[in-house]
Image (tube, helix red, strand yellow):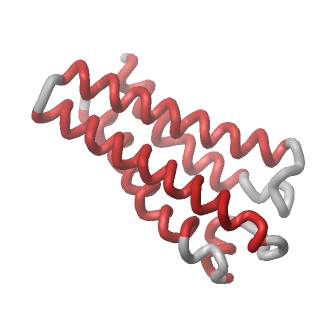
């Protein structure tokens, strides 16, 4: 696995891990809501889901870092498989965030565009770099 793929996957993983506490524990803070592009209305009703999504994203990030470790210190093909699977998860989760917005589930509507693009680019770059 080349350096571009490893760097893209690694940065994407770290971002997911760093964002987890915001989604899981600090979502009620106005600055976190602005960062995540969400409205505070009805937040108490979705905190369970934001916690679970944050935890799943953190697990994907941890899985990616484990895959990168395996690439560099274990069986490369196994590590590449782990990284590919976690990057596909990251990319598809990002795209589903955009679909949810298009369906009107994101408030304010259009609020997911920045997050969708930002969270899709690095896993896509990693997958492309792995493929070539």
Q: Quadrant of residue 46?
A: bottom right
The x, y position of residue 2, in whole percent, is: 25, 29
What's the residue at 78%, 76% (across, down)?
A: 40
The x, y position of residue 95, in whole percent, is: 66, 38
Left or right, 10 with reference to 96: left
Quadrant where the N terminus is found in the figure:
top left
The x, y position of residue 79, in whole percent, is: 25, 28
Left or right, 3 with reference to 33: left
Left or right, 119 with reference to 36: left
The answer to whether residue 17 is above or below residue 3 is: below
Q: Quadrant of residue 31?
A: bottom right
Q: So how many labels did they put on this image?
A: 0
What's the residue at 67%, 73% (across, down)?
A: 33
Question: Furthest residue to the bottom?
Answer: 30
Quadrant where the C terminus is found in the figure:
top left
The answer to whether residue 79 is above or below residue 102 is: above
Question: Furthest residue to the left?
Answer: 73
What's the residue at 57%, 77% (across, down)?
A: 26
The answer to whether residue 62 is above or below residue 25 is: above
What's the residue at 39%, 18% (across, down)?
A: 131
The x, y position of residue 114, in whole percent, is: 66, 55
Nearer to us in this view, 107 or 27: 27
Left or right, 72 with reference to 109: left
């Amino acid at each position: 696995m080349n350096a571009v793929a490893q760097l893209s996957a690694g940065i994407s993983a770290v971002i997911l891990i760093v964002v987890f506490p915001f989604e899981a524990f600090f979502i009620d803070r106005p600055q976190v809501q602005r960062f995540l592009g969400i409205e505070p209305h009805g937040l108490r009703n979705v905190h369970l889901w934001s916690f679970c999504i944050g935890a799943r994203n953190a697990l994907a990030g941890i899985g990616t870092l484990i895959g990168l470790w395996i690439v560099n210190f274990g069986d490369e093909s196994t590590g590449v498989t782990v990284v590919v699977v976690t990057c596909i998860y990251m990319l598809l989760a990002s795209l589903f965030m955009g679909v949810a917005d298009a369906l009107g589930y994101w408030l304010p509507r259009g609020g997911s565009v920045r997050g969708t693009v930002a969270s899709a680019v690095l896993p896509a770059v990693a997958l492309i770099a792995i493929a070539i």
